Amino acid sequence: MSILVLTSDTLIGTAATGNIEYNGQFFGTDSNASRAQMQRITQGTAVASTSGTSIDFTGLPAWVKRLTVMFAGVSTSGTSHILVQLGAGSVTSTGYISTAQYNAAATVGNTSSTAGYIVWNDVATFTFSGSMKIQTLGSNIWVSDHTFKVATNQTGFGGGDITLGGTLDRLRITTVSGTPTFDAGSVNILIEG
């Protein structure tokens, strides 16, 4: 069994056939010395969702192909549905096709939005834990799906899509009305290339 040890995070020279390098990203080379990026996962910095009307993750790398937005015990001060919005240079707040559903015993609720990927929220005391996956089809088309635990015995799920006007570089978590403040929990993202 062989072990490969990477001793530097600085790219030195041109990749040689068969080498693997680390320069902020992983690369492999084939027999034609063509270098290709290998998939990697980078975790963002967790943000306490305990104040403010929105939470932004900016400076997303151009190589991102999939984002996972993770929610742990997130709550807001109002009943406005939660939105996750993407952006290329600025946050995009139109053009989404997004729906969400909420199930609790004999109660089912539905909602939709063109302002962002929507997550059901109709009770201020609800807390959300779960994740939303957002991935590209190419050509700046991004699709999402999510599943959440809502309150203690209820679930929420949904999906959507958006075509951005450029390369994705930011993500915002807010609400439909933009006025309730976040008052509990934390959020973070995983970035995959």
Image (cartoon, grey):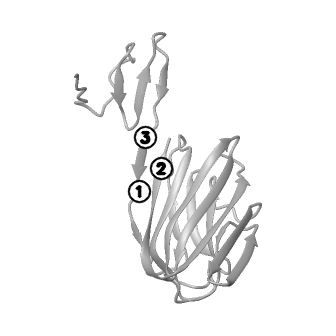
Q: Report the front residue among 92 and 113.
A: 113
- Kind of element beneath mark 2: strand
Give the farthest residue toward the top.
32
Q: Work out whether 193 lies above or below 147.
A: above
Q: Earlier in the sequence, mark 2 or mark 1?
A: 1
Q: Work out whether 50 lies above or below 84.
A: below
Identity of the amino acid at label 3? Arg
Q: Quadrant of residue 124?
A: bottom right
Identity of the amino acid at label 2? Ile
Identify the residue at image location x=57%, y=74%: 155
Q: Earlier in the sequence, mark 2 or mark 3?
A: 3
Q: Position of residue 125 (x, y in %)?
A: 52, 89
Q: Position of residue 14 (x, y in %)?
A: 39, 17
Q: Residue 191 bears which disc, if any?
A: 2
Q: Is residue 193 left or right of residue 16?
A: right
Cβ–Cβ under 8 Å for marks 2 and 1: yes
* Residue holding disc 1: 44
Identity of the amino acid at label 1? Gly
Observer able to see residue 139 = yes
Identify the residue at image location x=68%, y=66%: 116
* Residue holding disc 3: 40
Q: Position of residue 112 (x, y in %)?
A: 75, 71
